[in-house]
Amino acid sequence: MSTIFVDSELTVTRFSPDAAELFRIRDVDVGRPLGDLTHRLDYPALLDDLRRTLQGQSRTEREVSGLNGRHYLVRMLPYRVPSSSAQGAVVTFVDITQTRNLQLLQAVIDGLAEHVAVLDGHGDILLVNAAWTRFAADNGDPGLAHTGVGTNYVGRCDIGEAAIDSGYAKRAVEGIRSVLTGKQRHFTMEYPCDAPGQPRWFVMHARPLDGARGGAVVSHIEITRWHNQTEASPETSSGGLPGSDGTGADGGAPRA
């Protein structure tokens, strides 16, 4: 976080070392008008916002872009020096690029029809999309207590031999673990996930997240219509969903 203090005339009184990443500022610049210093922000209203903050004695907050491709949250707060009539403002610049990237990622996956979850290297859910949330709400887990962020996806799949779909669950657990441990680059399965009075089929895909932290992206999409068509006309099917390896899947929380 970068910080700059100015007085009532917008003259620099002090600054944090990190401020040099955004402003061309050195120790000798203390006492110079802030407007004389060049910076790496796309923020033409910087000085106007500072003046309004001082005049209104109120907090100002704004998100701005940097010329370095990063994004910052700018906060301005007025202050008064104790036992003095002197006043000024403190400006902080917080790098929120990672947060903005996560927001963009969330918007992208929320636009997908597939139910999507992002897992860490241990199989814990880090992120889900809107389709995943809607499916959970429609299938007995409206608060995502069992299938939401922070829960272990692999553990949810591993529902035990006594379950009706334990065969699918076992294959899903083995497949997801193989992706998480790097033994496989892609795992796909088709699996049944029936609603009351409504047989349904889904396909699950799991692919690893590249990078030091590891993890995987898991998606599910309903294929009931396609499955019924291929069952009725087996000669038109090669035994698997187009684009898959035709092995069939359990969806982390097929009964949720």
Image (cartoon, rainbow, N blue to C red):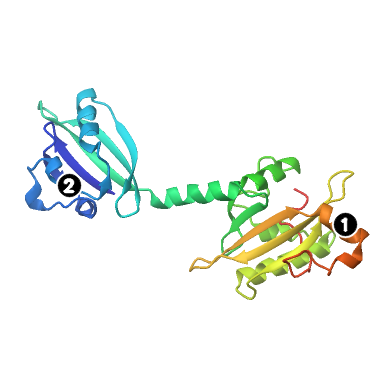
Quadrant of the image occupied by residue 54: top left
Instruction: Determine the residue positioned at 65% across, 74% down.
Output: 184
Residue reaching furthest to the top: 56
Residue 58: in sight, yes or no? Answer: yes
Q: Residue 26 location in percent, x, y?
A: 12, 53
For label 1, the crowd category at 10 Å Cα-Cα, with few meaning under 14, some 14 to 19 and many 20 or more, is: few
Instruction: Determine the residue positioned at 14% across, 46% down.
Output: 37
Residue placed most toward the observer, 109 or 158: 109
Q: Is residue 161 above or below residue 27?
A: below
Q: Residue 247 location in percent, x, y?
A: 78, 69
Q: Check contact, mark 1 vs mark 2: CB within 8 A.
A: no
Question: Helix, strand, or loop for circle 1?
Answer: helix
Instruction: Specify whether 231 is left or right of 96.
Output: right
Inspect the image, locate mark 1, and give the three-letter code of the amino acid beneath it. Answer: Gln
Residue labelled with disc 1: 229
Residue placed most toward the observer, 188 or 91: 188
Residue placed most toward the observer, 96 or 48: 48
Question: Helix, strand, or loop for circle 2?
Answer: strand
Q: Is residue 114 above or below residue 168?
A: above
Instruction: Determine the residue positioned at 14% across, 35% down.
Output: 10
Quadrant of the image occupied by residue 145: top right
Instruction: Specify whether 89 is left or right of 146.
Output: left
Inspect the image, locate mark 2, and give the three-letter code of the amino acid beneath it. Answer: Phe
Q: Is residue 84 above or below residue 202?
A: above
Looking at the image, is mark 1 or mark 2 earlier in the sequence? 2
Residue labelled with disc 2: 15
Q: Nearer the viewer, mark 1 or mark 2?
A: 1
Instruction: Determine the residue positioned at 91% across, 61% down.
Output: 233
